[in-house]
Image (cartoon, rainbow, N blue to C red):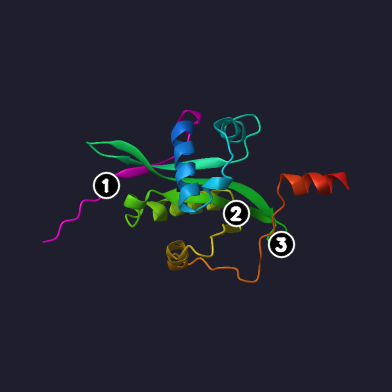
Amino acid sequence: MNIRFMPRFHIREAKENDIDIVFEMVKKLAKYEKLLDTFEATKEQYIRYGWGKESIFKILIAELNNLVESKVVGIALFYYTFSTFTGRPTLWLEDIFVLEEYRGKGIGTDILKQLAQTALEKGCGRMEWTVLDWNKPSWDFYINLGAKPMSDWTTFRLTVPEIQKLAET
């Protein structure tokens, strides 16, 4: 008989005192996505927009709990937008990340299940996120869950210099 050990983990909402591990996980995500050179966020910004008066996002943490260790192994940062066509909120998943050595153990799926429950509780008509074109493992994972890529939409972006220029015109 082949017995496989499955670590115990739970998912909880991050608190402000989780900032160090959240920040560490976000940096690991940036490295995985080959975007570490563009990473400029600060812990202070995360605290301000995650837990301060101007709070606009939430973070879920997947935490491994067993007799040997307690360790954060995954995170998801999300917030809400509004769909003019459905007339309902959309849960926007900005980022989800599970440490490589813990992938394939159901952690990412459970994080998404928790987000789906949250979306239903908030009356959301959609859950949406973007995936880098080269990230085939993530594409396969999401498609397997029933998500559909929206090939008829392209994301556009303005960064601070373009935003300033537009605001001044």
Q: CA distance from mark 1 to mark 2?
A: 32 Å
Q: Position of residue 64 (x, y in %)?
A: 32, 41
Q: Earlier in the sequence, mark 3 or mark 2?
A: 3
Residue 57: x and y, percent? 59, 41
**Circle 3 sits on which residue?**
85
Q: Residue 42 colored magenta?
A: no
At 75% from the left and 45% from the top, the residue drawn is 161
Which amino acid type corresponds to the residue marked 3 in the rendered image?
Phe
Q: What element does badge 1 sit on? A: loop
Is residue 13 visible in the rendered image? The answer is no
Image mark for residue 124? 2
Q: Is residue 30 above or below residue 43?
A: below
Marks 3 and 2, how far apart at CA: 12 Å
**Segment colored magenta:** 1-18
Return the residue at label 1: 7
Regarding mark 2 in the picture, which secondary structure is present there? loop
127 on left or right of 83: left
Q: How many marks?
A: 3
**Residue type at mark 2?**
Cys
Q: Secondary structure at mark 3?
A: loop
Q: Upstream in the sequence, badge 1 or badge 2? A: 1
Q: Quadrant of the N terminus?
A: bottom left
Outermost residue toward the left in this view:
1
Q: Residue furthest front?
A: 37
Q: Quadrant of residue 48?
A: top right
Q: Identity of the amino acid at label 1?
A: Pro
Determine contact: label 1, label 2, CB under 8 Å: no
Residue at left offset 45%, top offset 61%: 138
